[in-house]
Each structure stands twice: as structure tokens, then as C-alpha cells.
Image: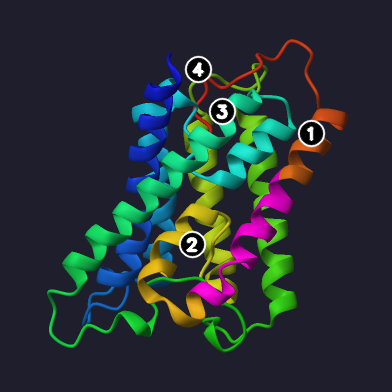
């Protein structure tokens, strides 16, 4: 599969993740009397990854996340030549998704993008008012575990064809735990899209949601390579759906 086709798959996969996940938070989480709430938003993120992993994972490996791409590179699952094209495609998909979501959400009277727009934050902008330290630890640990699950589920020794299910449920669990802390990032692209529309505080805090997920992902990739390495594993995720 050519690199442009892989990048295109990453664009659409990340678009769906951000539109589905953030869209559920912005449009449906607190809809009068029948809102889906935290549980619904968590499942929306998990289902968006699961569905696109099956749809395009066989083309690009289905990262949909710059931190995942960095972690898979650290684990030697993908070559360095994939890093920049994948991350650019992921950012583009996230920004376009946030733009489409903004067009829909702004069609409702009283819409105020500064109210949050599913942006990630800490301190006074954390849903539960959690500190910078708490947010950083949460994002590092959650992304670390996410990558360990991805690397394990896509190992040739794991049950074949089921990786997207494990990974989708893992992302759901991550959101169930960490939405109150940071609104859950574990994905720099997912954080960047909404932040560009919120501006102000969201952009000033965006650095954390690049640094912490990438640190957690790279640590997981290195630890997996050293402690859990399978010498028979393929060098890339061409056939494994690993969001």
C-alpha cells in the first residue's frame, strides 16, 4: 500500500474519531432529558475507533493518533518515513472534523464555543478541577496503557481479527476513568482540532496534550520492545488494526 493511501486512511479515521467522539460530547451528552452523558461519550470514542479500525485499519494500520504513531515507531512497528505523513494526515482529519462539528453546533441558538467545545484542559478548565500534575499523570498513564494494549492486541500471537474490539473497549475504559480529569485526550490530534476553535485557554493548555500522550506512548513502545518483544512480529501494522 502506498504512503499517500495510508495517509488518506489516517485522515478519514481521525476525522471519524474526532467527529464521533467530540460530536457526542458537544451535541448529545447533555441533550435535554435524554442526554447520553459520560457513559455515552466514552462509548462513542471507543466505537469510532473500533469501526474505523475495521474500515481502514488494513490500509494504514489505523493509528488515528500522533501518540500511537510515535509509540509504534518506538516499538519498531513502523518505519520513520511514516511519522510525518501520518501525523499531518491525523491533524488534518481532526481539524476538518472539528470544523464540521462547529458548523453543526453553531446552528443552535445560544451556542457558545468558548464554553468548551469538548476541548481538553486542566485546573479551572478540567471538568473536575484537577491540577496540572494530576492531568499530566493521568494522560501519561492512560496513553501508556493504551499503547500496551494496542501492541499486545496486534501481536501475531494474539487472536487474529479481534484487535479493534480490544482497542475500542480500551479507549472506552480510558474515557470512563479520565473524562472528569482532562476531558480525555490520549491523542494530540483529537485535542488540537477543538482547541483551534475554542482558542484562548484551550490553545494555551494544548502543549500538555501533546507532551503527555507522546511521553506515555513512547515509554510503552520502548518497554514493549525490551520486555515483550516477539522476534517473529511483522515490522509494521499493514494487516493489524491498531488505532
Q: Position of residue 132 (x, y in %)?
A: 69, 78
Residue identifier under label 3: 82
SS at mark 1? Answer: helix
Categorize mark 2 by other alpha carbons within 10 Å: few (<14), some (14-19), many (20+).
Answer: many
User: What label does residue 191 carry, if any?
Assistant: 2
Horizontal side of 45 relative to 243 (left or right) equals: left
On residue 239, the disc is 4
Residue sitting at x 46%, y 26%: 60
Report the magenta residues as a range.
203-217
| Element marked by disc 4 | loop
Label 1 – label 3 distance at C-alpha = 20 Å
Crowd class of label 4 (few under 14; some 14 to 19; many from 20; radius 10 Å): some
Question: Looking at the figure, which quarter contains the N terminus?
Answer: top left
Q: CA distance from mark 2 to mark 3?
A: 21 Å
Circle nearer the N terminus (2, 4): 2
- Residue 212 screen position, x and y as percent: 69, 60
Residue at 17% across, 66% down: 104
| Foreground disc of the pair 1, 3 | 3
Residue farthest toward the right in the current orientation of the protein:
227
Check whether the beta carbons of the residues at disc 4 and disc 1 lie within 8 A of each other.
no
- Position in image of residue 211 (x %, y %): 68, 59
At numbered mark 2, what does the secondary structure look like: helix, strand or loop?
A: helix
Amino acid at each position: 500500500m502506498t504512503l499517500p493511501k495510508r495517509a488518506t486512511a489516517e485522515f478519514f479515521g481521525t476525522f471519524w474519531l474526532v467527529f464521533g467522539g467530540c460530536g457526542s460530547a458537544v451535541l448529545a451528552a447533555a441533550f435535554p432529558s435524554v442526554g447520553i452523558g459520560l457513559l455515552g461519550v466514552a462509548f462513542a470514542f471507543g466505537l469510532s475507533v473500533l469501526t474505523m479500525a475495521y474500515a481502514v485499519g488494513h490500509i494504514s494500520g489505523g493509528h488515528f493518533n500522533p501518540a500511537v504513531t510515535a509509540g509504534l515507531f518506538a516499538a519498531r512497528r513502523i518505519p520513520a518515513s511514516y511519522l510525518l505523513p501520518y501525523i499531518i494526515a491525523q491533524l488534518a482529519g481532526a481539524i476538518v472534523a472539528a470544523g464540521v462539528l462547529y458548523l453543526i453546533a453553531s446552528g443552535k441558538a445560544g451556542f457558545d464555543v468558548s464554553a468548551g467545545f469538548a476541548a481538553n484542559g486542566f485546573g479551572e478548565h478540567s471538568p473536575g478541577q484537577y491540577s496540572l500534575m494530576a492531568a499530566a499523570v493521568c494522560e501519561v498513564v492512560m496513553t501508556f496503557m493504551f499503547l500496551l494494549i494496542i501492541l499486545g492486541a496486534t501481536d501475531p500471537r494474539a487472536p487474529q481479527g479481534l484487535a479493534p474490539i480490544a482497542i475500542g473497549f480500551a479507549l472506552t475504559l480510558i474515557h470512563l476513568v479520565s473524562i472528569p480529569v482532562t476531558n480525555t485526550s490520549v491523542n494530540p490530534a483529537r485535542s488540537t482540532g477543538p482547541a483551534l476553535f475554542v482558542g484562548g485557554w484551550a490553545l494555551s493548555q494544548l502543549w500538555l496534550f501533546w507532551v503527555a500522550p507522546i511521553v506515555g506512548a513512547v515509554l510503552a513502545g520502548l518497554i514493549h520492545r525490551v520486555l515483550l518483544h516477539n522476534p517473529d512480529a511483522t515490522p509494521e501494522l499493514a494487516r493489524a488494526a491498531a488505532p
